[in-house]
Image: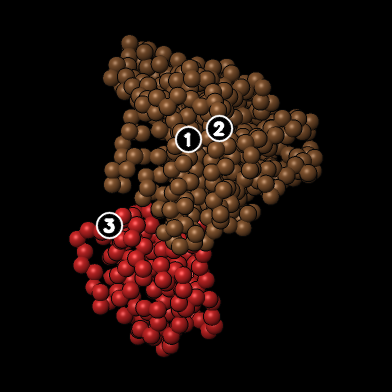
Amino acid sequence: MDLLPEELKKDFPLLRRTVRGGRPLVYLDSGATSQKPLRVLDAERGFYERHNAAPHRGAHLLAEEATEAYEQARASIARFIGADPGEIVFTKNATEGINLVAYAMSNAATAGPESERFKIGPGDEVVVSEMEHHANLVPWQELCRRTGATLRWFGLTDEGRLDLDDLDDLVNERTKIVALTHQSNVLGTVPPIKRIAARAREVGALLLLDGAQSVPHQPVDVTDLDADFLVFSGHKMLGPTGIGVLWGRRELLEAMPPFITGGSMIEVVHMEASTFMPPPQRFEAGVPMTAQAVGLGAACDYLAEIGMDRVHAHEEALIAYSLERLTEIPGVRVIGPGTTEARGGAVAFTVEDIHPHDVGQVLDELGVEVRVGHHCAWPICRRFGIPATTRATFYLYNTLADVDALADGVRQAQKFFGTA
Amino acid sequence: MQLEAMYQEVILDHYRNPLHKGLREPYEGEAHHVNPTCGDEVTLRVHLAGSGRDARVADVSYDAMGCSISQASASVMSDLIIGKSVQEAMAVGDEFLALMQSRGRDVQPDEDVLEDAIAFAGVSKYPARIKCALLAWMAWKDATARALGETS
């Protein structure tokens, strides 16, 4: 098995702490947020200790250094996904990145002719899927509500894959944008993006990918992705909270009206009206989250040095092992693909006759921290006719022993509630 | 282990054999409450005899989906308040709310008032689970307000 060395865990101070009566921590909730290596903590602290100032304004030395650090971070992040730094827009998180595009599309109605491509109204369609995180569903519901456009979606197969049977009907000449997860946060499913991208291209629709769960866990190169937009969150990939990224093709960003307006995104301001900067500054109003960007830049460098192909292989080994260990327990049902093929590191499951909340409580008592509930993707639960699931998510610092602790914990829960 | 403190036998018994479960007629007020963080749901009906705060709780019926804590709480609650006046039942609800908000500290719950509901004391130490224990109580308050015509 292609596992990363266990010493790696030492880079993460938090993973050394104990929980619930001195038990070692087994952190299996990286899909919600990841832990941070010293390298990232040092980068953020170092920025505040030596270079802190507002970037892209002021002409003093610290302002120069802060601007340099902020733009260096942008360059590191761009390199990490094979993009041009000018195509990297900093946002609060992936959610804000999606809202930025959705609101830019609303705003296009009253913007100039250069925004024609983004205009949307009655008769137009937006396509999502039944496996979207609420972050990639609600902003599109709201866009459709504001503009009179129609929301449509891909259904799921029983195995938790996208049902592409009606691809040509769903994505058609009326489709303005297709917004899809690049890796499901519940099922782990990685949809066949190339096929969908080809169809979107054919009908002239835009394609936005929610990379919140893919960019942290698999090599992603935007030049190979065939997408128009990609969003992701820093905190899920070893970086700080409060920083995320919207990547967009340059010509699209250039034609897109702004979402949030204010300082530092303007060119010339008069009392009557203003003109805006080119991207990415056009989309970064206000003093940005500079230290957080620096932290995310350090996280990208850290991950790149290890190698995302190795991170991916490591997680694949953990998923394979967890699928094996969990499915051998009577009463456990994994929701999502049963193999590692086109599947990332989220393993959601139900335990017969024990509610996920109660499974999670027993696991927590044993120091195993998982997520329980609908994981901000409620329609998936409805699709599979279950109220909620227990979900384990993995990252580079997890080990086979962590998977054993999970499986043993599930058996303990069954013992405690007398179902096995 | 802390687990036994939380999952008292009383709670597990009510979970496995819930009392008063199922939606029944007649009723004057109904409420549907969800816990948006986990998806737990309860639909609860209140049937009152008489009017105003002196009315008697003639029946509480419910349909619920959720964890052992939320299910057991609905069962314990309905058994506790059926037969009481609305005013008395509200007082029990207030006592239960105080217990849940105690975070396991500095509280002397009145066992005479709470009866089986005292078993939920351990739950108050787990902030993430308090909402589970309160779900049915909140739905009951809401349904009762509707039955009394206090809200639309």
Q: Nearer the viewer, residue A200 or A357?
A: A357
Would residue A297 appear left or right of A106 to someone viewing this image? Answer: left
Quadrant position of residue B77:
bottom left
- Of labels 2 and 1, earlier in sequence is 2
Nearest to the eye among marks 1 and 3: give it. 1
- Image disc number at residue A317: 2
Q: Nearer the viewer, residue B83 or A99?
A: B83
To which residue does mark 3 refer? B103
Specify the quadrant of the image occupied by residue B117: bottom left
Indicate the amino acid at tag 2: Ala
Point out the frontmost of discs 3 and 2: 2
- The relative height of residue A316 versus residue A50 in the rendered view (above or below) is below
Q: Tell me whether marks 3 and 2 sit on the same chain.
A: no
Q: Residues within 10 Å of mark 1 (few under 14, many from 20)?
A: some
Q: Which of the image's four quarters has the N terminus of chain A?
A: top right
Residue A381: assigned label: none
| Local secondary structure at mark 3 | loop
- Tell me residue A362's x, y (percent): 40, 53
- Measured in 3D between alpha carbons, the distance from the residue under mark 1 to the one under mark 3, in whole angstroms, is 36 Å
Chain B as rendered: colour: red
The local secondary structure at tag 1 comes to helix
Q: Which residue is mark 1?
A: A400
Identify the residue shown where x is 19% and y is 60%: B106
Q: Out of A107 and A98, give the one closest to the viewer.
A: A98
The chain holding disc 3 is: B
Q: Pointers 2 and 1 in contact (CB under 8 A)? A: yes
Task: Check the image and report above or below for B83 versus A392.
Answer: below
Count residues near mark 3 (Cα–Cα under 10 Å), then give few for <14, some for 14-19, many for 20+: some
What color does chain A have in the rendering?
A: brown
Name the amino acid type tagged 3. Answer: Arg
Parent chain of label 2? A
